Image (tube, helix red, strand yellow):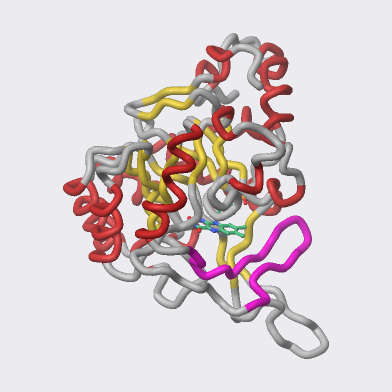
Amino acid sequence: MAEDAGQMRVAAGRLEFKSPVLLASGCASFGEPFEDFFKLTEVGALITKAITREPRAGNEPVRICETPGGMLNAIGLHNPGVEEFATELLPKLREAGVTVIVNVAGHSEDDYIQVLRRLRDEPGIYGFELNLSCPNVDGGMMFATDPVLFGRICEKARAVTELWLIPKLSPAAGELAPYAQIADGAGMDGVTVSNTHPAMALDWRTGRSRLSRPSGGLSGPAVKPLTLYNVWQVAQTVPELPILASGGCSEACDVIEFVRAGALAVQLGTILFHDPLRPRRIHEELPALIAECGASTLNELRGRIG
Ligand SMILES: Cc1cc2nc3c(=O)[nH]c(=O)nc-3n(C[C@H](O)[C@H](O)[C@H](O)COP(=O)(O)O)c2cc1C
């Protein structure tokens, strides 16, 4: 897919991806929806749907609704649980040679640690994205909005595995830079900026939520300027910490904007529901845009703002 592999390769700290285009957690399931569209080995990484200790059925429908410029979701961590992931789903990804980052979620510190322990020696996993910020389950925000709990879970996770660890920050925390500093201090390999934005949508006639829960998480183009700001803030504060940008990336030029703001790579989420071929299109378009910026590799553009 990428014409020039070197031009697309991005690396910082311990993180390295052959492409800056990653598939965001929950928006690519375990890769199956894309098998007819492109090879999963062509993207930088597949970030799995959140994996919890036990299987979870998620929230009742309605779990997704459209809003102007964005999507509101309240999936509620629907997933088969760590055991089925390890024995049924991971082997297929491993055999296919996909770069897998497992998104880990839980309700307690112990939940996270148990999932990491179960998976840390499984071949075929490059790292873990710690989903500390799920807005769609009760109590799901606490690790991302309390600096003490956030720091403690990062440290405990670090003690469990040497694989990449990337906590996913939440916009609900307010300014994200202090959390990035804590993550850096706890030896995290990077941060994802960020999860969805707590939001709601109402039916004006009935006053009822358009989701089965009163609120959900907003994603898509509507949040892109917010993500860009948060990425830039974090990059200014902790310049050495690799950032994975997540929130509103849809086009090849968005990738360049996020990288210029300081991101190492970007995650495609909501756009995949509209256009499953978008990773391929972005790969095709990026080389010309990089050249137009006067650079020979994307990595060179990181942090280069006017
Ligand atoms: C339907 C749906 C399910 C999601 N599930 C997860 C999840 O399981 N774990 C997680 O960390 N983020 C989850 N997210 C958040 C995305 O990974 C991503 O951070 C967010 O949607 C912002 O990116 P986007 O604007 O490109 O969609 C989900 C988002 C959507 C839309």
**Residue 262 at least partly seen:** no
Is residue 58 found inside the magenta-colored segment of the image?
no
Q: Nearer the viewer, residue 81 or 116?
A: 81
**Ligand 1 quadrant in view:** bottom right
Residue 11 picture location, percent across and down: 42, 23
Residue 195 picture location, percent across and down: 51, 55
Q: Residue at coordinates 59% horizontally, 70% vertically from top-left?
A: 74
Q: Nearer the viewer, residue 88 or 305?
A: 88
Q: Residue at coordinates 45% horizontally, 71% vertically from top-left?
A: 56
Quarter of the image for residue 19 reads top right
Residue extending farthest left = 159
Q: Residue at coordinates 44% horizontally, 77% vertically from top-left?
A: 138
Residue 174 picture location, percent across and down: 46, 59
Q: Is residue 181 above or below residue 66?
A: above
Q: Which region is colored magenta?
A: 61-79
Residue 135 picture location, percent across and down: 50, 68
Quarter of the image for residue 147 reads bottom left
Q: Quadrant of the N terminus?
A: top right
Q: Is residue 235 above or below residue 47?
A: above
Q: Quadrant of the C terminus?
A: top right
Residue extending farthest right = 205
Q: Residue at coordinates 51% horizontally, 46% vertically from top-left?
A: 230
